[in-house]
Image: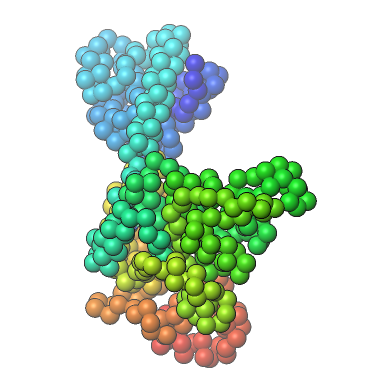
Amino acid sequence: MQKGKLLIIDDEERLRNLMARILQLEGHEVITAGTAKEGLRKLQQENIQVVLSDVKLPDTDGITLTDTIKKTYPSTEVIVLTAYGTINDGVKAIKAGAFDYITKGDDNEKIIPLVSKAMDKALLQQKVLELQSKLNEKFGFDRLIGKSTAISDVIKLAQKVALTDTTVLLLGETGTGKEIFAEAIHQASNRNTKSFVAVNCSAFTKELLESELFGHKVGSFTGAVKDKKGLFEEASGGTIFLDEIGELDHDLQAKLLRVLESQQFLKIGDTKPTQVNVRILAATNRNLQTEINEGHFRSDLFYRLSVFQITLPPLRERKKDIKLLGEYFMQYFALKVKKQVNQLSEEFVSKLEAYPWPGNIREFKNVIERAVILTDNNVLDESLLPHEIQQQQVKAGAPISAFDLSSVEKLHIQRVLNHTHGNRAEAAHLLNIGVATLYRKLKEYGLE
Ligand SMILES: Nc1ncnc2c1ncn2[C@@H]1O[C@H](COP(=O)(O)OP(=O)(O)OP(=O)(O)O)[C@@H](O)[C@H]1O
């Protein structure tokens, strides 16, 4: 018998507690409620598999409640407790979708196996639904949400280049979707039956990155106890995505250039070159031209990498997509945390639209996840937003420009205030300005 979470809804406290004890002794986790309203709230907060409900409740009847529960939580099973001699209620309950009904005061021996059967069924249904939603997870370009011209144009560009073997350099601020784009390009290419390997070039030391990317021969350095395949070999036939390419060390830049020119490289400690067939996609949020001018990045590698450049727009330049993205992530996280959340309030959307999103979609996604976790009902409203977003002044027709220096200053001040929990003296100290100056700026930016 599988164990799970049970909810008992009955206004008779003594009976409720007695049933709870019996089922707890069977190993189930039991939650109780005295009214339908309270029960529905618990269903929203917890992942409950089986509900045992009295047919007579102070605020509604168990049959109507069964109908509501089955419509909102189809994988949850309901058992209705009917009064002695009211078979008709039992029939109605089954019609409304109940798993079964049981006469109140019946032998406890009957409840235990019935709950156990309902539990098995609910857990199985839940598993099937989870698998289905995994299967429905979108792949490729379908995963990219957005209808604004800014994003549609880059999607079209990426779809075209996906069909070729061309190297692509993805540019854009942090969190704009460079990796998800790279994966979509791979999925839409004829390499999609082979691996997509993503490497963050800034996450390793030079030596480790070299060995990760190109592999090594046994004994080539202390710790190289056996031959190791590198990620270029792992990605053979497929695609490798080199994120933060601007961080690549000079020696490795030379090695990468060779791969781009001849699809060959030397493993650490090897004398014979290894041949691979890999498509290279790279990304950076640095300005590579500046890196070249400062001598940090090889210009010949840059020219090879940037045969086809795609620049992803920052979120603040895709205001039109905010609502769509908000609804998408709301549904995504509601499903993940098993909550019924299905609406964004107008103020919530306006505040999101007014905020400049320095962390782009990554930051946006986190804000929606937090709101879904915090909400106690089915609507996301502005009170669920972090302080700095709540404080945004919603000005009709005056979007914050990405290039406006004052918008950066305003955002920075808001963040510092957030950090100091609104303590202005401490914020002024951290900002290294006088308190009077801070007050003047708060007034200027409408942050008072
Ligand atoms: N258009 C989009 N639709 C849906 N989700 C998106 C979209 N763009 C980005 N995301 C999501 O936003 C998050 C950040 O995206 P991603 O990691 O691809 O950004 P990045 O530009 O590679 O960031 P970094 O430069 O910091 O590595 C991911 O969870 C990604 O799934």
Q: Quadrant of the rendered structure where residue 87 is? A: top left
Please give the name of the residue rendered at 34% of the width and 46% of the height, measured from the top-left corner: 190
Q: Nearer the viewer, residue 233 or 203?
A: 233
| Residue beneath the point at 25% across and 29% down | 67
- The residue nearer to you, when weighing 381 against 159, is 159
Q: Nearer the viewer, residue 197 or 123?
A: 197
Q: Who is closer to the viewer here, 87 or 410?
A: 410
Q: Quadrant of the C terminus?
A: bottom left
Residue 219: horizontal and vertical position, in percent?
A: 75, 47
Q: In the rendered view, does 271 fall on the left or right side of 143?
A: right
| Residue 186, horizontal then vertical, whole percent | 38, 50
At which x and y percent is residue 11?
A: 38, 29
The answer to whether residue 89 of the structure is visible from this angle is: no
Q: Is residue 305 left or right of residue 330?
A: right
Give residue 41's quadrant in the image.
Answer: top left
For residue 109, say whether it is visible: yes
Name above or below for residue 359 compared with residue 48.
below
The quadrant of the picture showing ligand 1 is bottom left
Scheme by which the image is coloured? rainbow
Residue found farthest to the right:
222
Q: Residue at x 49, y 58 (%)?
A: 262
197 versus 430 height, above or below: above
Q: Which quadrant of the figure has residue 315?
A: bottom left
